[in-house]
Image (tube, rainbow, N blue to C red):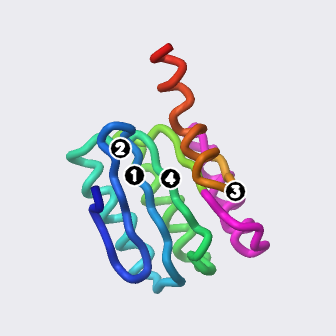
Amino acid sequence: MIIYDKPHASIDYNPDTKIGFVVWKSNCTMDQYRDVFENMLAYAKTHLMKYVLSDTTNQGVVSPENRKWFEKEMIPAAIEVGLEKVAIITDANVFKRYYLNMLLSAVNKFGVPFKIFGNEGQAKAFLLEEETLAAE
């Protein structure tokens, strides 16, 4: 179910898997970046969203201000409403890897598993691995 769709990003929520899937479509402003996560958080307050999958392939560079905001504001708020794991899909862009590695170290402080993948299949498998094991 599409819960957000703008020229710079979209969010799809799957109630069966509890995955919020952000697809970044282009570079965005500081306000647009924050708007994506604020909308996702608002939705997660009324719909359990245990996992976040973010495809950053077309995202562009994220400013240090937005990275710090994400670490200090968004991660704690998302954990409070049920976030358990985060998976990122990305290309090998060195600037994006730097940004994601900075997020990885920040998120790890909160004890939330966070991994970076090259494709959607691997990322979803990581997010759902414990659910799969529990069902067996």
Task: Give whichever of discs 4 and 1 has the lower sequence position.
Answer: 1
Q: Quadrant of residue 9?
A: bottom left
* Residue with the mark numbered 2: 49
- Label 2, secondary structure: give it: loop
Q: Which residue is mark 4?
A: 53
C-alpha separation, residue under disc 3 versus residue under disc 4: 12 Å
Q: Residue most toward the top?
A: 136
40 in magenta: no
Give the residue type at disc 3: Gly
Kind of element beneath mark 4: strand
Q: Amino acid at mark 2?
A: Met
Which sits earlier in the primary sequence, circle 3 or circle 4?
4
Vertical relation: 128 (above or below) 79: above
Residue 75 vs 23, above or below: the answer is above
> Are dots 2 and 4 in contact, CB under 8 Å?
no
Marks 1 and 2: in contact by CB < 8 Å? yes
**In terms of sequence position, does the residue under pointer 2 or pointer 1 come before the other?**
1
